[in-house]
Image: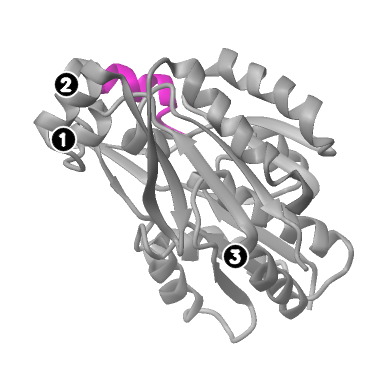
Amino acid sequence: MGRIKIFADSTCDLPSSWIQDYDIGIVPLYVTFDEETYRDGIDLETEQLYRKVTEQGRLPKTAAPSPNDFIQAFTPFINQGQQILYISLSSELSSTYQNALIASDEFHPGQVTVFDSLNLSTGIGLQVMKAVRAAADGKSVPEIIKLLDDVRPHVETEFVIDSLDYLYKGGRCSGLQNLVGSLLKIRPVIKVIDGKMTPAYKIRGPREKALNQLVQNVMTRVAEMDNDLIFITHSLADEDAVQLRAALQAGTGAKDIVISNAGCVISSHCGARTIGILYTKAIS
């Protein structure tokens, strides 16, 4: 068969220049305010999302692409004789993975392969880039899946959420927790464990303390890292991202430390000024 086309969805949060340069297919998720539905990253950008939340006083709903969305995205490349490898948002967080599987059944066996990243944001992006580079090296789909199976449990995804406000609006904490958290300046840290967003710990005090803790957590694991690529992914926290990159450049020796922006779906669940560091541990 022909060459392999790597697909992801809009929650992978890869820089747009990388998506273009590496010819990565993207299937957008949906963001809905009342009767208005937008494609993540196409019809709606993150800054627009926040303006709408401020105007309406509530969060949007988010939705997975339908099986037909995947079929329409994959078909042109299948018709060109290419194989599709789609790396999805965690099946523990969305029906995106399941809908892609349904779509894959509409094609001949082997034409479309769906892989569950069990992650989100650039935790997906790290796996996508491993697949892209493996495909460029001439690896087959089964070989790339074997690689991804090995990489997936070694992806470290850790975010600091700046405010409990979006967790409250999304029904993931109570009004009292939101009030107390705001008064005490409590910032939750979220990790992805077994494909789920898991509260790891809380940091009380100024934002700088939380950012320093993120960096220190990485520094304690430098010896375990694969030293290839680190993502700093954020939602409207540009200055902090630049500062984190400088700290990581000085302390990790990573080949590439890339700043990326969180899209609308991720931002709608976490809120403005959320920032995370994502990397892969070396495979022993």
Q: Is residue 95 magenta?
A: no
Colouring chosen for the image of the structure: one colour
Residue at the spot of label 3 = 153
| Between 41 and 130, the one nearer to me in the picture | 130
Q: Earlier in the sequence, mark 3 or mark 2?
A: 2
Q: CA distance from mark 3 to mark 2?
A: 39 Å
In the picture, the disc for residue 46 is: none
Question: How far across and down, in percent of the image, does residue 42 sit?
Answer: 47, 34
Q: Earlier in the sequence, mark 2 or mark 1?
A: 1
Amino acid type, residue under disc 1 in the picture: Asp
Question: How far across and down, in percent of the image, does residue 250 sit?
Answer: 80, 25
Residues tagged 2 and 1 counted as in contact (Cβ below 8 A): yes
Give, as a single range, the part of the protein colored magenta.
Answer: 41-53
- Res 264 quadrant in image: top left
| Between 24 and 2, the one nearer to me in the picture | 24
SS of the residue at dot 2?
helix
Amino acid type, residue under disc 2 in the picture: Gln
In the picture, the disc for residue 34 is: 1
213 sits left or right of 54 in the view: right
